Amino acid sequence: MDTIAAISTPTGAGAIGIVRMSGEQALCIALRFFTCSTIKSPEDVVPGMLKLGTFFDGSVREKCMMVYFRAPKSYTGEDIVEFHVHGGTYLAERVLGALLAAGAKLAGPGEFTRRAFFAGKLSLDEAEGVRAMISAESEAELREAYSLMSGRFDQKINALMTKLTEVLSTMEASLDYPEEMADEADDSMEKAAEVREEMRALVESFKAGKLIKGGITVAIVGKTNVGKSSLLNRLLGYSRAIVSDIHGTTRDIVGESILHKGVKINLQDTAGLRETGDVVEHIGIERSLAAAKGADVVLYVMEAGGNLDEEEWANIRACSKKVILVNNKIDIYGATERGFNISAKTGEGVDVLLDEILRVTVGDSRAAETLTEERHADCVRRALRSLEEGIAAFHEANTECVLVDLRESIDALAEIGGGTATERIINDIFSRFCVGK
Amino acid sequence: MRYDAIVIGAGHAGVEAALALARLGNQTLIVTIDVKSVSHMACNPNIGGTGKGHLVRELDALGGQMGLNADASLLQIKMLNKNKGAAVQSLRGQTDKEVYHEVMLSTLRAQERLDILEGECEDLLVEDGKVCGVVVSGKTYHSTVVVLCTGVYLSSRTITGEEIHDAGPYGFANSKNLSAALAAKGLPLRRFKTGTPARVYANSIDYSVMEREEGDYDIPCFSFLTQTKLLEQVPCYLTYTNAETHRIIRENIDRAPLYNGTIHGVGPRYCPSIEDKIMRFADKERHQIFIEPEVKDGELMYVQGMSSSLPKDVQEEMYRSVKGLEKVRFARYAYAIEYDCIDPLALTPALEVKAISGLFSAGQFNGSSGYEEAAAQGLMAGINAARKIKGQPPVVLRRDQAYIGVLIDDLVTKGTNEPYRMMTARAEYRLSLRQDNADARLTPIGREIGLVSDERWAAYLARNEKKQAIRDAFKHAVPLAKVREIFEKKGEPATVGLTIEEMLKRASISAEDVLCLLEEPLRDVDLAKEIAVEIKYGGYLYKEKRHADDQRKMEEKMLPIDIDYLSMENLRLEARQKLNKVRPLTLGQASRISGVSPADITVLITYLVKAGK
């Protein structure tokens, strides 16, 4: 059985968020992220004991507690790992996201309970509790379903399912009606590849959705006196709302947040890359590079009149995929041919720069079809994975084998869009092809 | 008269039910409106086809009769999808209709504990919610169970243009009174429609302008007991409709009962009449027409693909517009037939009517279509009726065990809005449910039920033992020189010695290629192929198995029969109503009902815990 994970505390603010994971792989997945001085290997984990340690998902380190219950002495009768993180959904979601990316499957409604039941572990008291929770949950789901039904997101999922169904029904019809389908053209794989690209875009948009929720982190780096602080002040002055004041842990990195077109942008002003002596310069660069690495977008600021420091530019680009070259002080030097031209002093070009930050991060996908719910993202990701496997197998494997993957793909989408693969396929076969005696 | 069991109808469902009941030790009566209609093939003269061929093999593996009967009357046999994977290969055999009927009739006559009665069943006797007998032509017969297999005979009418007859198929008498009697007992009846093409004289066809369709000579027959291959075969012929045919149909469409409102019954989408094909798929330039023999060296041919309910004069004109049929003479015209049947949601997975204990049903009465679908249900209804008599729990095949399981589960869990036809696309465990391994999947179950004879059991064990020996031999290492010799012919590079199993993992290497590496007694190409399939499907079979194992727990969790779904407040209203209507046998079945969500299943679970189940 799959290893499943979910946030098991109610959404919204609370003192503690609990992320629960159940299944054979639970401990193995957990230890890819959780470190603690007394745990060197899985054998060191003592069942039932709450351990304080660090959860590190590659970008953010978070102090949290982990507890492990060994099968069969657990709620589900399987290995269970729980992470207790500081309140608020953001951190819990971040932990969950890491577990899912590492191979856990998002638990369906009541799935923990179902496993507990089949393991003979569900007591009467628990059953009563679960029932109350489930009806609340399904009510929430129903509301969610209604809001989705009318949204563009639902249309997008339905459009994907329709296209994928066409691919499948052509292939299925050729198996069930070999004589009648002999003269039908088959462009299934080209169509499947199109669907794959659309799914990839949707999965990408999920990352954008996350960014919209958590905000985009922008690091401003560059040499001293090129106008980084002026730029920060200009951006803050330009923005209509100051959301919060965040003081970074690193003394000389200052963070401020602004809203631009409804998206939160967390600005990090770094200390300038100093040029006084080799050792200090080295420290300066290291520090700025660290900030750049943690950011979603890096603004590399220089004077429009200056020459590009090729080595430094290369170093910055090595640590982030999204670096924007910003030429400041065009009010003095005039515009250049490279990168973005702005004047922090007059404000010229700043709004274009903000748009560019959104474009390279959340793209044009900020519309309703952006996946923001983890459940939907999980479905589309699984659908994409199966579709990719199916396409990869297309040239070596028999049609009926490829169809195992493609059906899995459509069933994953159907968890959002409703129905089952079989029903959709059979209806489609008879509406599109003239088959049967 | 008193019987243990009475079967109403002796079509493809009825004969299987009656034979199963009698063979399981029950005094059985089978009632037919006309002895000449026993196992009558009212439509196409063939058995099998995609998905359907699987059903016949499964039925045979369980100890049913259809496979043996088809083999006894074969004119041609073919493996469909021969160039595709093993899981979608299906047998289809052309059969001699007269021989098919005669062989089955004599099988019934030879069967101990089985009586045949000619007459019309007019009423059902029910006491305290339990069936206790039937009335046939005014006379009462008592029994513990009754199996309804009325096919398309219930209040049926046949339609050819303006001509409407109060009759059954092929001019047989229909059943006039039973339908109303069943409705009066509260059974939810509805009206379906199907149709058949014309039968024409063989000597009025010009075969020389048609494409000849031969059978396969190197494949096994339907039954696992049939050891021989079919060496003498009869061809079929292929021709096409054309623009002229389509023009004739379009110009006369207002005279088509399907289009002018004469027919109300719901017809199957996968079995469209020719007028339906032309109207719905106007872009298609031509449609295939297969000319198939009704009997060996007989005078009649079946015109597959030209099912219609257009008037006779239009039929003549459109048939004669087809290449090779210019001078065709009609023996019987095409017709549509409407009939009463039951909403299968009223049935349990054992095919027992929920509202009346001891009443079972099978075949077209249950909303299916096709000889094979009918026979498969007939066998299961017969088995479960027999178990009811003995107080044993029903046998319900799971979806990962058999196409028969898929067929019945679909009918009783999801219901159907048109005559239901089996397709491989309906089976989610398609790679595992192959026609070649039907015996491995089902013969042990059939043996436990009591329908697998000693002869069949011995044959099964021998086959199994040989399969195991081949499987073991496939694990032996083959020296490099030998590997190279075989690989070179296929253009595969060979660098090290391999086991046969490893060799077979290459897509281009088939069971036939490695047969020479086995010792003489193990060189059975059919068995070697079967094992090679398991090797080649490898990871995909594993995927299916994992899904099936996950689902199994749900399938094994029985739901109490007396659950009051309507008062379960935590269930959504839709789920309460659907669960109450279907009354699923297991948690697995409940989860497949449309409108029942995973959250609803969790609520059901909490009730089970509370009830201490």
Image: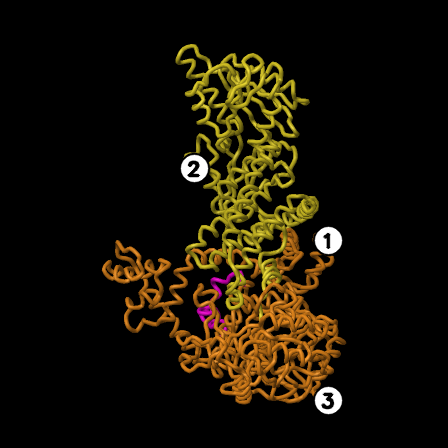
Chain colours: A yellow, B orange
Give the label on residue B138, or none: 3
Which of the image's four quarters has the C terminus of chain B? bottom right
The magenta stretch is B427-447
Say above or below: A214 vs B195: above
How far apart, in angstroms, are the residues tagged by discs 1 and 3? 50 Å
Under tag 2, what secondary structure?
helix
Badge 3 amino acid: Gly
State the quadrant of the N terminus of chain B: bottom right
Which chain is mark 3 on? B
Kindly indicate whether the residues beneath marks 1 and 3 are on one polypeptide chain: yes
Mark 1 belongs to which amino acid? Glu
Residue beneath disc 2:
A44
Contact, CB < 8 Å: mark 1 with mark 3? no
Name the secondary structure under disc 1: loop
Q: Which residue is mark 1?
A: B569
Q: Position of residue B542 (x, y in %)?
A: 45, 57
Q: Amino acid at mark 2?
A: Asp
Q: Secondary structure at mark 3?
A: loop
| Residue B377: image location, x then y, percent | 58, 73
In front of the other: label 1 or label 2? 1
Mark seen at residue B452:
none
Discs 3/2, front: 3
Residue A35 x, y percent position in the rendering: 46, 32
Q: Are marks 1 and 2 on the same chain?
A: no
Q: Residue at x 48, y 81 (%)?
A: B74
The answer to if B411 sits in the magenta stretch is no
Count neighbours of disc 1 (C-alpha within 10 A) and say few if under 14, some if 14 to 19, many if 20 or more: few
The CA span between labels 3 and 2 is 83 Å
Q: Residue furthest left?
A: B481
